Amino acid sequence: MEAKVGAWNNKPTLFVNGKPTYACFYALTDCPGGRWTWEEEPQRNLRAFAAAGFRLYQIDLFLELVWAKEGPLDLATVRRHLRGVLDACPEAAIVIRWHLNAPGWWAAAHPEELVRYANGEYEKIERTTPVRLLMDDLRRTPRVSMASEKWKAMATAKTVELLQGLAKTPEGAALAGIHVACGVYGEWHQWGFMRNEPDTSAPMQKLFGGPVPTVAERAALDDGIFRDPAKRKNVIAYYRCQQEMVADLIIHFCGVVKKNWPRPILAGTFYGYFFSMFARQATGGHLSLQKILAAREVDYLSAPQAYGANYRDLGGSGITRALIESIRLHGKLFLDEMDQTPSWKWMNNVDTAFALTDVAADVAVIRRNVLESYTRGMGLWFYDFGPANQAGWWMDKRLMGEITRLKALLEQYHQRVYEPAGDVLFVFDTEVYYYTGHSGETDPYTDPVAVNRTMGEAWRSGAGIETVHLADLPRMDLGRFAVIVFANTWLLSTAQRRWIKTELLDKGRKVIFQGKPGYCDGERLSESFTRELTGETQEIRGAAAWREALRAAGAHIYVDGDRPVHVGGGLLLIHSKEGGAARVHLRNGSRLDIDIPAKSSLIFDTKTGARLLL
């Protein structure tokens, strides 16, 4: 098996054995009872997705489960894990999600390498039932610091051992990629980041070059939500050190994968999270996006879809957490993790343990979430936590029937030249989080409002939306966009302010500024920087207000009524919770008068207006 990412039909594309392939995977859970491929329930699920046409699979593998003590890896278990997929689908291309967290016994033997928390000692956690190995990652637990050189050397050696061992086996012939994973839930967040303040450990202090900031120093602000760059250099430098460390680790381990496999192989990871980061971007987010996008070692990024009512609830947008257009610009593939539960309910019945309670809503959400990635030129995997965390979320004939039809449709449209269709561009920045409060308490505006409320509401405006990192804005084909929205760009250098003025404002482009654009230049804070760009910023509240603001700026509105739209790659999806009569306006001038059912996601061909998957 050979696998790589390359350009094809105007988008980054997965190639398997030289053939361009729609990147749609099935993945088992990491939880006990549903993770080992050879067991009864996982076998049933794997075979069901094989029957639905799936040939791409991902499986979790923890270093801790195949390295129980000093000595070689338990390669026989790894081979059996791969063989379970091949038993269900002999043509499978398999990606291993390789969890590099140090085993508990290794951590206990190296207490000097453990993460420490500025806000308290380790919590005492007692459990009496089997749990996920990732359980309690968000608590103050004795995990090994990602700054540990001893851990890095050990994890590197074991990754090399895994790859070189598998390369000699029949099962290794099906290996298409390695997804490197570490940190909270394997997603490269700092340990305990949402509720705690890592990392004061000796390894981190060595990496940083001195004592790391205290809790009080991290929380200190000087001007509203802002840190004064001149006064808070140490805190800014610490957060930057922590973020760069994670990016360097990802690049290192992806490079190890590629160097130690005899054929082209995918190397990717969880990274690029931006939306629904719980106002903890600097503490545990993914701020070094540009470094990762520039790294040749990394083929793809991935993330679960955004959390919260505006995103995941019926009627929400179902968007990814990443700035997809930046990832596409850099030629990387992005894989959404579709891990949203259908409407299973515990029935406590001897004949029916679980039952679906709202199939219409389940189908609507599946369509919405899957089309989100496809319309933006990317792929996804169905990550199957399942009822009771033992896989099987979609093991209902009605849901599997929908997934089968949907995949067949997207396979067909995938063959066409990809054309992006958004004409509203939202510009976001990651660097700004070094200069603003480190939580929702100290900065209740940047992440909660300017990013997440804005995106949740704007995506229900009926417009076609794209998102880009500020650093990539000059690379975009701006002629496609009716309006550009600067959402959280409080940090702008002199050169960036000048570019915005000469390339956008002076040329008459429609621009909407939120908050205080350019208030910080990285060296000081000044209202004069903001006045260089605008005398007035807009605070737009609600989907209807965004719809009218975007319409007034010249953006195309596909449908009224606070309905999320996903459009691109020849397809238009309209998602609706309440339903009702609506007029759909296509970009070619055609109008469709339709009755939208409640709890539905309708799919149309953007050129013909034909409704698909009736």
Image (spheres, rainbow, N blue to C red):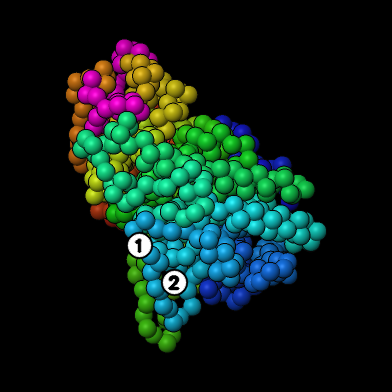
Q: Are marks 1 and 2 in contact (CB under 8 Å)?
A: no
Q: Which mark is residue 324?
A: none
Side (left or right) of 88 relative to 504: right
- Tell me if residue 215 is in the magenta stretch: no
Mark 2 crowdedness (10 Å alpha carbons): few <14, some 14-19, many ≥20: many
In this rendering, the answer to whether 327 lies above or below 308 is above
- The one nearer the camera, 503 or 87, is 503
Which residue in the rendered view is the most extreme toward the front?
Answer: 210
Q: Residue at x 26, y 43 (%)?
A: 220
In the displayed structure image, the side of residue 432 where residue 95 appears, left or right: right
Closest to the observer, 348 or 101: 101
Compared to residue 249, the image places residue 68 above or below, namely: below
Q: Residue at x 42, y 42 (%)?
A: 238
One can see residue 31 in this view: yes
Q: Secondary structure at mark 2?
A: helix
Principal secondary structure, stretch drawn in magenta: loop
Q: Which mark is residue 387?
A: 2
Q: Amino acid at mark 2?
A: Pro
Magenta stretch contains residue 524: yes
| Residue at figure coordinates x 66%, y 44% from the top left | 255
Residue situated furthest right in the rendering: 168
Identify whether 318 is placed above or below 63: above
Q: Is residue 16 visible?
A: no
Mark 1–mark 2 distance (CA, rounded to whole Å): 35 Å
Residue segment shown in magenta: 502-528
- Mark in the foreground, 1 or 2: 1
Q: Position of residue 283 (x, y in %)?
A: 38, 48
The residue where tag 1 is placed is 120
